[in-house]
Amino acid sequence: MQSSNQITLKQTPLYSLHQELGAKLVPFAGYLMPVQYPLGIKKEHLHTRQKAGLFDVSHMGQVRLTGKNVATALEALVPVDIVDLPKMQQRYALFTNEQGGVMDDLMVTNAGDYLFLVVNAACKAQDIAHLQKHLADQCEIDVLDDRALLALQGPLAGEVLAKFAPESAEMIFMSAKTLLVNGIECFVTRSGYTGEDGFEISVANREAEGLARALLADDAVEMIGLGARDSLRLEAGLCLYGHDLENDTSPVEASLLWALSKSRRADGVRPGGYIGAEVIMAQMANGVSRKRIGLKPLGKMPVRDGAEVVDDQDNIIGFVTSGGFSVTLNCPVAMGYVQTEFAQVGTKLQALVRNKKVPLEVVKLPFVKQNYYRG
Amino acid sequence: MSDIKYSAEHEWIQDNGDGTVLIGITDFAQQQLGDLVFVELPELGTEINKGEEISVVESVKAASELFAPVDGTIIEVNEALEEEPELINEDAMANWIVKVKLSDPSDLDDLMDEDAYNELTEE
């Protein structure tokens, strides 16, 4: 059954290493990806929170935009300040649609000569087509299929990387640098998707396995699968596109106001000017009818994606978009959307799970404190 | 030595020889599920029918139903699993989930022996 899938699924440059390490490989966004290693999701999760985890995220899309006015051009697609993004700095951004919804979330780095974008694997083809449609006449768009992406995440990530590349110690959260890591040229950002300090390392496909093996040789580093990546990002309150963010959820509804740069707001120096700006700016002025919030199920039963949320009159007032088990806190945690009048921290609600009502409380995100290195 | 049978749903059923059975999930199932974080235990006295959901075991990633392999009544649940669902990961065959009083002991004849089950999981 699986073998017929494997023919059409893509592999990352670390595929044989995953097999060698005993990974459980599953189809994900068109790739055969490691969901876990023999350590298991719980121990992988805790290892990342305590030491350093290495993730293969080569399925994600890496794109280079080159051109004279590339920053201005990209601002037509994202509600984020790209023009004044300092050199070798990274910023979180969103591709918006005409309805003010989110097509994808992405990372944008000003690499000096070009902009470096990292987009979600499942949205990669759509995003590249979107860039080509809107920006092809203004800049060169290169899809970096020849590069792998590794993430080194955890409180010891900085110490580990500094052994290979001492200059990495000067980097702070959301900065970028070209580094020689164990003699291999890498484009590195100090960022990630776990809530921990760490790095995302873009490296040529042919060098990826050598780099991974070098990092794994450090006692502090374990290979971590996508299962723990998901449980780590949920604890950190980070959105997963396709679950917490969708074409029909706006950044305002998604409680991502912080990602909407001041300069692009109504009272900013370059207000609007991106797809869906009218809708999003009206929402910022007038408010929205639903919001993304953190939900803490009381008890031990996990409440998962898709569960309906009801008030004490049994009216459906929202739904869960991500839910699972916090390994760090040893309890279930969830995120979802509820009508704004129920979005206040402390509000008591219930989720419907297998026809049973599970009591929930609206809580502040993140569930686990983010631990970024800010110098 | 007690008599252990298996279902196609990856459960083991231990015949206690007194008209009752213990039901758990197999090591194969435990490995497939990964780290368990929650086991939903049914209420005592619940009547169960073959093929119906009797419990749910949840890993970090997903929830999976446990289906009744026999007809009967739940007479005991393994309460230790409420606090320590990971006991099943540690030893799936030693940590039963429910104890059932059989309605019809001949239900056991329809279940697989160890060899047949091993063949199933090696496919």
Image (cartoon, rainbow, N blue to C red):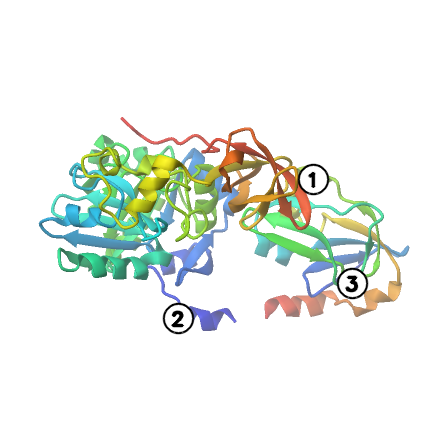
Left or right, residue A71 beside residue B99:
left
Residue B67: percent from left, percent from top: 72, 58
In the rendered image, the residue lying farthest to the left is A68
Which residue is depicted at the point 37% across and 48% down?
Answer: A55
Q: Amino acid at mark 1?
A: Glu
Q: CA distance from mark 2 to mark 3?
A: 38 Å
Q: Amino acid at mark 2?
A: Thr
- Residue A8, numbered circle: 2
Secondary structure beneath label 3: loop
Q: In which image quadrant can residue A129 be found?
A: bottom left
**Both marks 2 and 3 on one chain:** no
Which is nearer the N-term, disc 1 or disc 3?
3
Figure check: A219 above or below B30: above
Figure check: A342 above or below A214: above
In the rendered structure, are the residues bearing label 2 and label 1 in contact, judged by CB atoms less than 8 Å apart? no
Residue B71: percent from left, percent from top: 83, 60
Which residue is depicted at the point 26% across and 32% down?
Answer: A172
Q: Nearer the viewer, residue A128 or A160?
A: A128
Secondary structure beneath label 1: helix
Give the residue number, with chain letter if any, for mark 3: B50
Residue A365: percent from left, percent from top: 46, 33
In the rendered image, the residue lying farthest to the right is B18
Left or right, residue B40 beside residue A10:
right
Q: CA distance from mark 1 to mark 3?
A: 24 Å
Mark 3, chain letter? Answer: B
Binning the other alpha carbons within 10 Å of mark 2 as few (below 14), some (14 to 19) or many (20 upward) gives few
In the rendered structure, are the residues bearing label 2 and label 3 in contact, judged by CB atoms less than 8 Å apart? no
